[in-house]
Amino acid sequence: MMASSGFLSTLVSIALTFTIIAPVVLIILWIKDWIRGQLW
Amino acid sequence: MNIVNSAVLDASTGWIILAVFSVVWIFLGWFWGRKAKQLDDFMLAGRNVGMALGIATAMATWVTSNTTMAAPQLALQLGIWGMLGYSLGSVGLMLFAPLAKRIQLLMPAGYTSGDFIRLRYGKFAWRVFLLISLFYGLGWLISLGMAGGVLIHALTGIDYQIGMTVILTICVVYTLLGGLRAVIGTDFLQTIIILVGIVILAWLVIDNVGFEPMHKAVLQERPELLNLLMPAAIMFLFNNLLFGVGEIFHSNVWWSRAFAFRQGVGFKAFLLAGLFWIPIPIVAGFIALATPALGLNVPAADMVGPMVAAKLLGFGGAVLVFIVVFSALASSLDSLLAATSDLVLQDIYRGHFRPQATKDELRKAVRWIVVLLGVITWLLCLPRLTTLASLLYFTGAFVASTIWPIIAGLYSKQASSTGASIAMLTGTVIGLWSYFAIGFYVAALISAVVSMVIVLFSMWYKPDNFEWNILNEQIKEKVS
């Protein structure tokens, strides 16, 4: 059973979307921790 | 192998990037670590790390050369399942989330994973575990050091030995200056750089090559890479899952974070880090599938990632991939240096030679140990012995044998010292045999299964009745 071009593009697109979201979430959490004085 | 002529960056550009990042990481290491006067500050960042830094350090440490360089390598060797199998490495991070919570509950004053094994299973199992853990730690350090040298050579033509020496030296210096506080602080920035970098690279690969031409070329030249029923790749998928779980469950890199995170942070931080980690090997790995479309001749599989980026993106791409992989290497090397030196300090130096050592003495000793580990790694990296992935998977047989002794030890009173010791030894031996007799992709799988059977059998045949408070009270006595 061979992966189609559509399968490949869907897989990579989903992965790429989550990889774009991750740094945004991290920066928001950092700001939140920093404001509360809870970075470390 | 000499790829100096095909290097995209000239050596002087390479040196400039190395110099800039060396100054930044070392300055930040000093800045964040300057208040680390106490032993707990140096070893465990004051045991008060918050959510943002917690997630980032778990992600950054798990995104290593193995992800940024070996993920494309595995995509080229095992196709789609190679990428997916690599992304299952995140299961280990997510499964460690409840363990981190349990570790903090049972051992709020603990220092290392060795502390747990010693108190839970006694001295023999502790020594077996230390052998496994230190072998793995050194194997990972060598793999990272070699990856650094390979990357710098591939992209700039700077000699492998010189590049490897520079990366190791930078990490040793800033870990020395700031301990775990420096490691966790720099990990946050390195995570952001890695994520942004691989998004840009993947985006440009899609834009320059496109899915359709990429798929068509792979189908013509390497159709097996698109085969969703490739047996070796499916075995790899499960093997990698168990390898990742074994690496994380036993390694002091992760235990030291469980001890360092503020109460209530560990569970969420590891869970989110795992979720955010899932797509990274796919995004980093799929660019290797562009090699047939590009007509790229890859001289060594572990160089495929940097070579594709350099070929496609020219100077800017080469600079970007250099910075991304440099950050990935540094974020893991520093963590491993810090955690392994903690293990050597607490379990070898203090545990075996200087049980009465004061905290002042230990604070000085830990710095010497960081330097010593750096030197040993450097010596072992000098000859480039094997490809990165095969070296790494060699340790799979060792670490997977610790999964069940650790789970059972944390959650069941019935797990016994004898069962844990036999499980670790037998799992390792049979896992190693399968590595050579069958292939690298089954070593962790077989080791974990053998170890599980022995642990479960021993719990049924001769159950122990462990007292949980021993884990906390004996450490408290020792610390005070």
Image: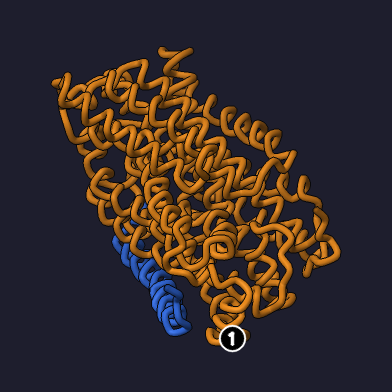
Chain colours: A blue, B orange
Viewer-closest of A40 and B53: B53
Relative to B92, say whether B325 is above or below.
Answer: below
**Quadrant housing the C terminus of chain B:** top left
Foreground residue, A5 or B288? A5
Determine whether, in the image, residue B132 is placed left or right of residue B373.
Answer: left
Q: Which residue corresponds to mark 1? A: B213
Residue lying at 67% horizontally and 49% vertically, measured from the top left: B167
Amino acid under disc 1: Pro
Residue B45 shows in the view: no
Q: Residue B189: percent from the left, percent from the top? A: 50, 61
Residue beneath the point at 42% across and 73% down: A1
Q: Position of residue A23 (x, y in %)?
A: 43, 70
Please provide percent x and percent y for residue B10.
Answer: 82, 66
Q: Between residues B422 and B216, which one lies in front from this camera angle?
A: B216
Residue placed at 64% from the left, 70% from the top? Answer: B320
Above or below B275: residue B217: below
Q: Where is residue B314 in the image (x, y as percent from the top left)?
A: 73, 77
In the image, is residue B227 above or below residue B120? below
SS of the residue under disc 1: helix
Q: In this view, does B322 lie to the left or right of B104?
A: right
